[in-house]
Image (cartoon, helix red, strand yellow):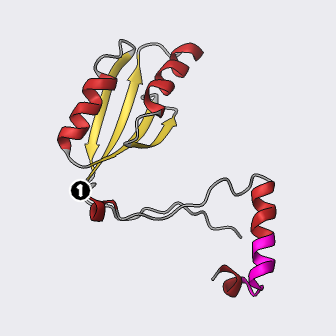
């Protein structure tokens, strides 16, 4: 399919993709999932503010969140908050368990703000390359 779009044979396209992977330009390949069709009906956008933001505090918080499977994206950001994360789960009870297990007990979490997504308008992981 890609080869057709760029006018190359399948083997030539595969060689170019392999070269891009070898150079680290392509890190991963993704499937776009309709989460609601597999029972994941809740998306929550969460801003987290830490009390202290030393390198050790940042590392500790990041490690506490990284292995939680429902966190699909985690960003360390500028501005009034320190982190932005995206939680995808089956229901609000699952999100409630997440915050009780990770955010409430963390003594370095000053505050967090949750925004429940009512409808996803655009979810694009690609960037136009010109």
Q: Residues within 10 Å of mark 1 (few under 14, many from 20)?
A: few
Principal secondary structure, stretch drawn in magenta: helix
Q: Is residue 60 placed above or below 81 in the rendered structure?
A: above
State the image quarter where residue 122 is shown. bottom left
**Which of 36/114 is in front?**
36
Q: Is residue 105 placed above or below 89 in the rendered structure?
A: above
The answer, for residue 54, to whether it is visible in the render is no
Helix, strand or loop at mark 1: loop
Q: Which residue in the structure is indicated by mark 1?
A: 118
Residue farthest to the left? 93
- Residue 121 within the magenta-colored segment of the rendering: no
Is 53 left, or right, of 115 in this rendering? right
- Residue 8 placement (x, y as % from top left): 77, 85
- Residue 108 placement (x, y as % from top left): 40, 14
- Residue 106 placement (x, y as % from top left): 35, 16
Is 27 left, or right, of 103 in this rendering? right
Q: Which residues are magenta?
A: 6-15
Residue that appears at 57% across and 63% down: 126
Residue that appears at 77% across and 64% down: 18
The answer, for residue 107, to whether it is visible in the render is yes
- Residue 76 placement (x, y as % from top left): 52, 33
State the image quarter where residue 120 is shown. bottom left
Residue that appears at 80% across and 70% down: 16
């Amino acid at each position: 399919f890609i080869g057709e779009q760029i006018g190359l044979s399948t083997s030539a396209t595969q060689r170019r993709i392999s070269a891009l992977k070898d150079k680290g330009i392509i890190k991963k390949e993704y499937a776009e999932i309709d989460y609601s069709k597999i029972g994941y009906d809740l998306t929550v956008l969460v801003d987290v503010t830490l009390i202290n933001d030393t390198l050790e505090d940042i590392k500790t918080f990041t490690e506490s969140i990284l292995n939680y499977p429902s966190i699909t994206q985690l960003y360390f950001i500028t501005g009034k908050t320190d982190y932005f994360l995206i939680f995808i789960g089956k229901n609000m009870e699952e999100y409630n368990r997440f915050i009780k297990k990770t955010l409430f007990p963390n003594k370095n979490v000053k505050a967090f703000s949750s925004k429940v997504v009512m409808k996803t308008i655009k979810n694009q992981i690609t960037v136009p390359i010109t």
